[in-house]
Image (tube, rainbow, N blue to C red):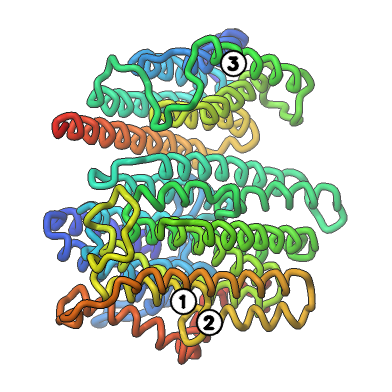
Amino acid sequence: MSAPLVLFSFSMLTVVLTLAFRNDTRAASTLASVGTLISALFIFFVPIDQAAEIFGNTFRLEPDWRLLGRALVLDQVTQPMVGFLYLSASFLLLPAWLAGGSRYIPALAVVMSTAAGAALMARPFLYAAIFIEFTAIVAGLILVTRKTPRNLGALRLLTLYTLGMLIILITGWLLDQGGITSATTGMINRATMIMIFGIAVLILVPPFHIWLINASTEANPYALSFVVITLQSSALFFLLRFLDVYPWLRENQLTFQSIRAGGMVCLIVGVLFAAGQRDLRKVLAYMIVADIGFALLSTGVGTSAGYQLALGMTASRIVSLGVLSLGLSLLIEPSPAGPIVYDSSAGSVMARLAVFVGMLSISGFPLTAGFPGRWSLMTVLMDSGSINAYLGFVTYLSLSVVTLWWGYKLFRGGIRGGWMQVSLENSFLLLGVAVIFLLGLFPQLTYPWIVELVSGLTRLFG
Amino acid sequence: MNGIDNFLLDLQIIPAVAAPLAAASLLLVDRKAWKIYILAIQYVIVAWLVLSSLPGESAVVKLVAGLISTAILYLGAGRSEFSSLESGNVENLPRGRFFWLTAVLLVVIGTLGVSLEPWMPIEAAQIPVQQAATLLVALGLLGLGLSVAPLQVGVSLMTIVSGFEIIYSALEPSLAIVALLALVHLGLALVVSYFEIIRHDSASEESRTT
């Protein structure tokens, strides 16, 4: 039996069950979360390509699933990355019903995770571009709903990812047919630039971040966070796999210069525009762009430590963005179309606290989940003494100032009595806030595990 | 390759001329229904063009996937008042027919100018076929740049992917790519139809409440 086929079948079963319970969004979210968790456990713990025994019966799960002469492969390279995607989906889907999105979102989220997983398993892995396009198509269905019918952001996402897919497919052909070796410098630089351009589209380097800004005011914040996290994680894994597979790519300084330049553009655009916004949803969108910039700067360092930091930041982003967007969804639910009024005491205090703590974590504030990665990056950059280090430090401080200013705005209306009442909503938000601080205080809980995520990329980390 | 395939290949200049005409018409026509009919015709033309690099069966797969995509768009647009004119979410984009005609002519002349010399050494595709593919991509990009209406954006994306497929089929004639790109067309049609339906329902609700 083929492991990818088992995974695909189980995911589809989860989708069917989730759809069957769509009218009870709490049950649908829980089912989707449990289903993706079981999928993640299957990926992490079931032995693949080894004989195993259950109730006296011996079986062997094959790592590949062949279709039309190509394959989806779940081996030691892809296993941890695909498992990570499913695990993050499970984490985000559990409280999804609180965010008040469409009843179809849990089912679509499972489909999206499956498509993103398939992108990582595709062989030849350049076919991943087509699966990432499928992920974007499902993302469009998640972002636009009857409650949030505006579609400019989703259309732009679809447009950019379609063009990105075509660019990456052409790059793949160039790599396969063009006879690229370490000796063909001109060809290498051309292929590198085309590929970096394609990846820049997928990874949201400005101006390709434009869909995120539109979607931030159109879509449900929690749904948008799920989409961003899934697309970003897939794109980062995609970039790392490129670097792992093609030695000429990681030996070319142009590659890392381009990645660092992309990171700096993200930081500058993210911080400058975040500081100028009056709508919290747009601030969040630009903070995500800046956060991606830090991850790109880490990748652009071009060392194992840099790649691991980028992955660590991706993992902490899941927690920070999840808590932040859940709080934001609860704040804006009364009037999804217009900007939020912050100085009223209309929103729940716990929701405002979740938004503020999530922002602190995304900006890398001490004691939060975002801090260890951000601080380690600053240390690595400062050691190099480059202009990137100083610019990175300035943007880091600027993001913190923007966050503190928004914290003041969120709480200047005061806190009414009775805000500590026990409810499932408050419990989830409090748990999320606690996880952010826990990961900030004890980064050793997650960072070693993050390193394992990419242990299969032996050429990159060997 | 059978007799019909050979006959169609001998006449490939016809789809090579018809493809850009169809793509240009998609930009110049306002009525949703006509847009969808022209898209269906464009899929027939594209299937004819890829015959130069793919077996007949694969071209038929592309044709069937394209026609199903068109049917999905038809159902979505049909729900959102079929006879209505295309309209976008943003009002300040240029909409005059003269402007569109000028833009199309400029893009066609510019693209033909740069594609007189083959920009990629592809033996499996003749120069007129390559030019037709390039024009499809260029006109699709023009449509994307000048409209934010879901149907126009969707149709433009499908045009771009079609143009790309004509070239890419010659580079990578694998069945898996044919199948996956066919699924991309279906996915794009599905999501665009969904946007159309949601937009229509939202507009209906707004008009009921006012």
Q: Are marks 1 and 3 on the same chain?
A: no
| Protein chain holding label 1 | A
Above or below residue A263? Residue B16 is: above
Which disc is residue B104 wearing?
3
Q: Is residue A280 visible?
A: yes
Q: Earlier in the sequence, mark 2 or mark 1?
A: 1
Q: Which residue is mark 1?
A: A361
**Residue A449 or residue A359, whichever sits in front:** A359
- Whether label 2 touches label 1, CB < 8 Å: yes
Q: Where residue A37 sits: x, y (%)? A: 31, 72
Give how far apart the Cα atoms at labels 3 and 2 are: 52 Å
Three-letter amino acid code at disc 2?
Phe
Residue at horizontal 21 percent and vertical 63 percent from the top: A97
Q: Where residue A80 sits: x, y (%)? A: 47, 73
Q: Is residue A59 visible?
A: no
Residue at horizontal 87 percent and vertical 55 percent from the top: A183
Three-letter amino acid code at disc 3?
Val
Which disc is residue A371 wearing?
2
The N terminus of chain B sits in image quarter: top right
Above or below residue B164? Residue A139 is: below
